[in-house]
Image (spheres, grey):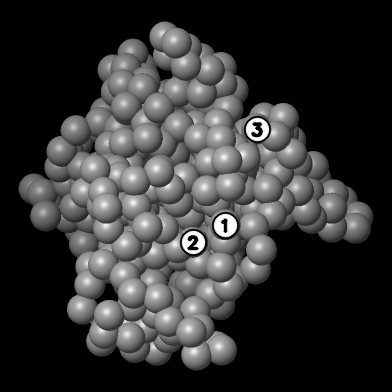
């Protein structure tokens, strides 16, 4: 059976729900297809100690403030999961799950969405699958030779699995710093980064980061000089656990090693360290394989967009993948504006 809503939203995490909120307000007929079995998106799969960079009120989707978490200024991941589940229910968003999308195809005046649960044909499609499902591992020489345990950020849960072990954490961003801080107390830790860690000022949190990202986008849109945005401030938000480990001298970064050995890693000067596990906090790439049939991919795996709308396929919008689909659009608070703009553009398309 083929179903024909006006809009299909692919992905039921924060970006998909924000799109659904605005489509609902505009009276557009739509469905959200989510590959997960329960509400909460990628937040269900993060490490146990992860906390937001901003207070709850500054980490909210459109229309509904996130309630504070008792005893915490910065909510944890499980609190976000509960918020997203409540948001979905509150606005009666039509989420179907688990539905895994195999591909999006042009089909005359429609886009055809093929899934493991049937076929949908829509006048417009929103891709909101994020990046969590496509972890990136750099091509470091000797990686296949290492006999210890390899993990990416997506597989890390907590320090209990590594107590007393020799662990190397790779990556100088927020994930690398938070996981290194998590492990600094009970492991023999090496934290490897490509450049010395750049901490933001201790009083900067997600509120300032969103303002910086927005200011950069406005400057670029007006043809002004690039302000540098978030990158100009630093790479690591000094969240409380990171700040504590740093101030106690437990977060000492080493340069990036040049290759892996069967038992550990080796640096450019020939020195070596043994390791039982390496945790790669090396980022993600957009999860866009379902759009391959449209043949839209360009440099660095991105699809050329004007705002959220694909330049070459204007019936397609991409939401929540990073600044190239809206300033801070990969964040809870940042996805609201591009979601609203995408919904209004699709509503005009359907007239």
Camera-nearest residue between 136 and 113: 136
Rendered position, 267 above or below 337: below
Circle 3 residue: 205
Give the x, y percent position of residue 117: 10, 49
N-terminal label among 3 and 2: 2
Q: Which mark is residue 252?
A: 1
- Asked whether disc 2 touches disc 1, contact meaning CB atoms under 8 Å apart, the reply is yes
Residue 268, image x, y percentages: 55, 88
Residue 335 visible in the snapshot: no
Foreground residue, 162 or 99?
A: 162
Question: Would residue 192 be seen by someone viewing this image from the given angle?
Answer: yes
Question: Dot 1: few (<14), some (14–19), or many (≥20) neighbours within 10 Å?
Answer: some
Q: Mark 2 packing: few (<14 Cα in 10 Å), some, or many (20+)?
A: many
Residue 275 lies in quadrant: bottom left
Residue carrying label 2: 191
Looking at the image, is 45 positioned above or below residue 165? above
Give the total of numbered labels. 3
Q: Position of residue 47 (x, y in %)?
A: 32, 42
Please, what secondary structure does the residue beneath circle 1 have?
loop
Q: Residues within 10 Å of mark 3 (few under 14, many from 20)?
A: some
């Amino acid at each position: 059976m083929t179903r024909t809503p006006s809009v299909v939203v692919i992905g039921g995490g924060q970006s998909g729900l924000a799109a659904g909120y605005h489509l609902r307000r505009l009276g557009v007929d739509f469905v959200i297809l989510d590959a997960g079995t329960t509400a909460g998106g990628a937040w269900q799969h993060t490490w146990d100690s992860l906390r937001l960079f901003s207070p709850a009120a500054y980490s909210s989707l459109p229309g509904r403030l996130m309630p504070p978490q008792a005893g915490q200024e910065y909510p944890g991941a499980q609190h976000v999961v509960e918020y997203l589940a409540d948001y979905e229910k509150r606005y009666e968003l039509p989420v179907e799950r688990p539905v895994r999308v195999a591909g999006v195809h042009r089909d005359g005046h429609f886009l055809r969405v093929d899934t493991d649960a049937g076929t949908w044909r829509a006048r417009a499609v929103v891709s909101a699958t994020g990046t969590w499902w496509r972890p990136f591992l750099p091509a470091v020489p000797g990686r296949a030779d290492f006999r210890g345990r390899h993990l990416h950020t997506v597989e890390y849960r907590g320090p209990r699995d590594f107590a007393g072990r020799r662990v190397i954490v790779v990556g100088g961003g927020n994930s690398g710093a938070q996981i290194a801080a998590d492990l600094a107390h009970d492991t023999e830790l090496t934290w490897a980064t490509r450049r010395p860690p750049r901490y933001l000022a201790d009083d900067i949190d997600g509120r300032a980061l969103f303002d910086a990202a927005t200011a950069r986008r406005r400057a670029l849109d007006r043809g002004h000089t690039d302000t540098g945005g978030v990158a100009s401030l630093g790479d690591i938000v000094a969240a409380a656990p990171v700040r504590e480990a740093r101030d106690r001298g437990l977060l000492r970064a080493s340069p990036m090693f040049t290759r892996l050995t069967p038992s550990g890693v080796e640096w450019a000067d020939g020195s070596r360290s043994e390791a039982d596990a390496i945790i790669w906090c090396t980022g993600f790439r957009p999860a866009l394989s379902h759009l391959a049939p449209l043949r839209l991919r360009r440099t660095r795996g991105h699809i050329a967009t004007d705002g959220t709308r694909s330049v070459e396929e204007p019936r397609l919008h991409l939401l929540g993948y990073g600044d190239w689909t809206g300033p801070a659009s990969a964040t809870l608070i940042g996805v609201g504006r591009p979601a609203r703009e995408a919904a209004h553009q699709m509503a005009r398309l359907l007239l």
